[in-house]
Amino acid sequence: MDNLPDIAPLDHLEYMRYALSLARRSPPKPTNFRVGAVLVDEAANQILSTGFTLELPGNTHAEQCALHKFFAANAKDPADEQTALILPSHTVLYTTMEPCQSRSAGNVPCVDRILGTLSSSHPGIQTVYIGVKEPDTFVAANAGQSKLGQAGIVCMHVPGLEEEILQTATEGHRMA
């Protein structure tokens, strides 16, 4: 990955600002939120992968793209469930919007993808840093944070960019 920003360790606001810059690369559409995601090895302060809505073919979400790109670059078979074992032990995810808990387009929900990184022998993603809760535009009362919390994954709100995140996320909705 080229041209990665130099972000100080544990600077959650800067990582979220970087995720927001990725969200802005997503094409505005009336049927999607523009979201950015950054997968980080928190112990090494290293960006592992990034993603944004519709970056990959299909109706892809930011978290989905970031995880797929990481596994594709680091695993022999990205479809193999054991690929989660290659994540560094202190992997965290920054996402501008709460991960989805359901999908209407046949894709696996982002929450389930995050939960898929957990195993009895590997901690997987243990913390998800979130810019805003998902608005009720497409899925009423998204309980993504709740489902992650029930599995022991910490969800932390990163304050300070909410207005910019929502404006970016819904840009395509004003086109409808």
Image: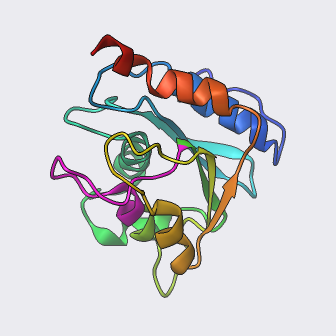
Q: Quadrant of residue 6?
A: top right
Where does the image place residue 116, in percent across and percent down from the top left? 39, 69
Residue 164 included in the magenta stretch of the image: no
The answer to whether residue 168 is visible is: yes
Where does the image place residue 95, in percent across and percent down from the top left? 55, 44
Q: Main secondary structure of the magenta part?
A: loop
Q: Residue placed farthest to the top in the image?
A: 175
The answer to whether residue 22 is visible is: no
Q: Residue placed farthest to the left in the image?
A: 106
Quadrant of the image for the C terminus?
top left
Q: Which residues are magenta?
A: 97-113
Q: Residue placed farthest to the bottom in the image?
A: 120
Q: Quadrant of residue 167?
A: top right
Residue at the image point whose x is 43% and y is 46% from the top: 63
Q: Is residue 12 left or right of residue 82?
A: right
Residue at the image point whose x is 24% and y is 60% from the top: 79
